[in-house]
Image (cartoon, rainbow, N blue to C red):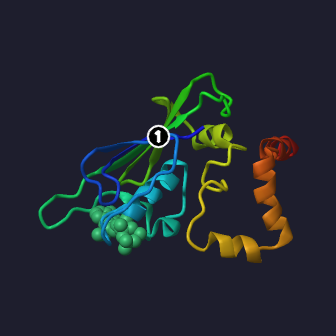
């Protein structure tokens, strides 16, 4: 399973629609300060369901929408689509390619899509559970994360191993069943 394609439109500094194709290997993003490198990683975390504007370096969710420049008007909507290769069928869905889309309007409401069909964030979370991808997955190691892992309590650290071992899905289902 790997990142195949990323499409960004109206998200942060990306006013125009851009599309990036990735191969199954190491990808490096280079560019001058302020050119949008971190905005790319923000867009990946955002499409995977990040709910905290602060962790996206903003103060409210609307801050992810292109706010305009001296020469360009703001836009009303941000949209990011992330396509993952699923030929290994790690995600329990009968498609060799899975595209996750998130859209947000200035009203603040987010919409989510799986392979272009409208869905809930919960559906995306379930699909990504135990794959290591996802907002809390160990595949995204942000700045300071290593320190956080090393200094966290054993119970917190255990969650990372549980995700890697693939048992989070069952724990979540058990917790949900107990709630009902
Ligand atoms: P560095 O090398 O310093 O880490 P970077 O390439 O990671 O830089 P980013 O932090 O991704 O740069 O991009 C910052 C730029 O994105 C700033 O110029 C900022 O004005 C712009 N930006 C962030 N949010 C928005 C927005 N909502 N609308 C327009 N531009 C935005
Ligand atoms: Mg940066």
Return the x and y of residue 135 as percentages of the image width and height.
60, 54
* Apparent side of residue 148 relative to residue 59 in the rendered image (left or right): right
Dot 1 corresponds to which residue? 23
Residue closest to the eye, 21 or 145: 21
The residue positioned 45% from the left and 70% from the top of the image is 57
User: Seen from this angle, which residue lies furthest left?
Assistant: 71
- x and y, in percent, of residue 71 in the image: 11, 63
Q: Residue at x 77, y 74 (%)?
A: 152
Does the beta carbon of the residue at mark 1 sit less than 8 Å from ligand 1?
no
Q: How many marks?
A: 1
Q: What is the quadrant of residue 69 in the picture?
A: bottom left
- Which image quadrant: the N terminus? top right
* Residue 84 location (% of width, % of height): 53, 37
- Where on the image, by quarter, is ligand 2? bottom left
Image: 35 above or below 95: below
Position of 57 with respect to 93 (left or right) is left
Nearest the camera: 59 or 46? 46
Q: Is residue 173 above or below residue 52?
A: above
* Residue for point 83% across, 61% down: 158
Determine whether 44 is above or below 71 in the image.
above
Pinpoint residue 9: horizontal percent, then vertical percent.
31, 47
Quadrant, the C terminus:
top right
**Quick one: which residue is furthest to the top in this view?**
94
- Mark 1 crowd level (few <14, some 14–19, many ≥20, 10 Å Cα): few
Pick the residue in front: 106 or 52: 52
Position of 136 with respect to 155 (left or right) is left
Tell me the element at label 1: loop
Which residue shows up at 34% across the image and 62% down it?
Answer: 36
């Amino acid at each position: 399973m790997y990142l195949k394609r990323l499409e960004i439109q109206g998200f942060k500094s990306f006013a125009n629609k851009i599309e990036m194709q990735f191969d199954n290997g190491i990808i490096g993003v280079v560019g001058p300060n302020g050119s949008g490198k971190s905005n790319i990683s923000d867009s990946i975390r955002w499409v995977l369901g990040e709910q905290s504007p602060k962790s996206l370096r903003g103060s409210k969710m609307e801050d992810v929408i292109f706010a305009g420049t001296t020469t360009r008007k703001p836009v009303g909507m941000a949209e990011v689509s992330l396509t993952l290769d699923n030929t290994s069928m790690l995600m329990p869905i009968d498609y060799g390619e899975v595209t996750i889309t998130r859209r947000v309007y200035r009203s603040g409401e987010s919409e989510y899509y799986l392979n272009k069909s409208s869905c809930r964030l919960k559906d995306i979370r379930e699909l990504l559970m135990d794959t290591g991808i996802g907002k809390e997955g160990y595949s995204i190691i942000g700045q300071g994360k290593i320190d956080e892992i090393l200094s966290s309590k054993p119970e917190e650290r255990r969650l990372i191993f549980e995700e890697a071992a693939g048992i989070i899905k069952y724990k979540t289902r058990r917790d949900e069943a107990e709630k009902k």
